[in-house]
Image: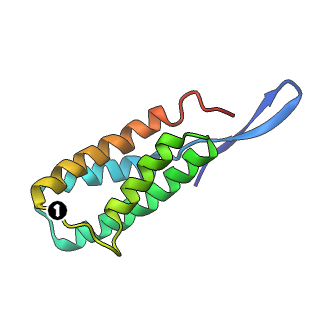
């Protein structure tokens, strides 16, 4: 999933992995679409996909030593996990869907910028 490129730094080379943008953009779009009335299966699939992408993003944040981002993605994974469901009203879920979409969208910019190597 992750793309790597070799960066030469003073005689050494190390692989730099980037956060894969396609799954994150797709999840962000799916979360925005989720504010509309849709079949129950859509929301179940969305929970699974958000869980997977949150775990992936949290892992990348861990690799890049972005502690605050790790906790943010863990919170999203717990909130959207399909096994132990968190019950909110439709209105609250709509707000949470938009916030989660913004978190994923901004993660492409914030988490990958000025990484500590």
- The residue shown at (78%, 38%) is 14
* Quadrant including the N terminus: bottom right
Disc 1 secondary structure class: loop
Q: Position of residue 2 (x, y in %)?
A: 60, 50
Q: How packed is label 1: few (under 14 Cα within 10 Å), some, or many (20 or more)?
A: few
Which residue is the extreme one toward the top?
10
Q: Residue at x 59, y 41 (%)?
A: 18
What percent of the width, then of the height, locates residue 78? 37, 62
Which residue is at 82% across, 35% downward?
13
Looking at the image, residue 49 lies above or below residue 57: below
Q: Position of residue 7 (x, y in %)?
A: 75, 32
Q: Which percent across, then down, holds residue 3? A: 62, 46
The reply to whether residue 94 is visible in this rendering is yes
Q: Which residue is mark 1?
A: 88
User: Residue 79 lies in what quarter of the image?
Assistant: bottom left
Name the colour scheme: rainbow
């Amino acid at each position: 999933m992750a793309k790597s490129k070799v960066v030469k730094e003073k005689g050494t080379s190390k692989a730099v992995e980037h956060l894969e943008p396609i799954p994150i953009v797709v999840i962000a779009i799916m979360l925005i679409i989720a504010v509309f009335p849709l079949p129950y299966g859509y929301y179940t699939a969305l929970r699974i996909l958000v869980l997977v992408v949150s775990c992936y993003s949290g892992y990348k944040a861990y690799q890049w030593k972005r502690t605050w981002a790790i906790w943010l993605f863990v919170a999203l994974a717990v909130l959207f996990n399909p096994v132990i469901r968190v019950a909110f009203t439709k209105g609250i879920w709509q707000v949470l869907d938009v916030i989660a979409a913004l978190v994923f969208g901004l993660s492409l910019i914030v988490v990958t910028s000025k990484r500590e190597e």
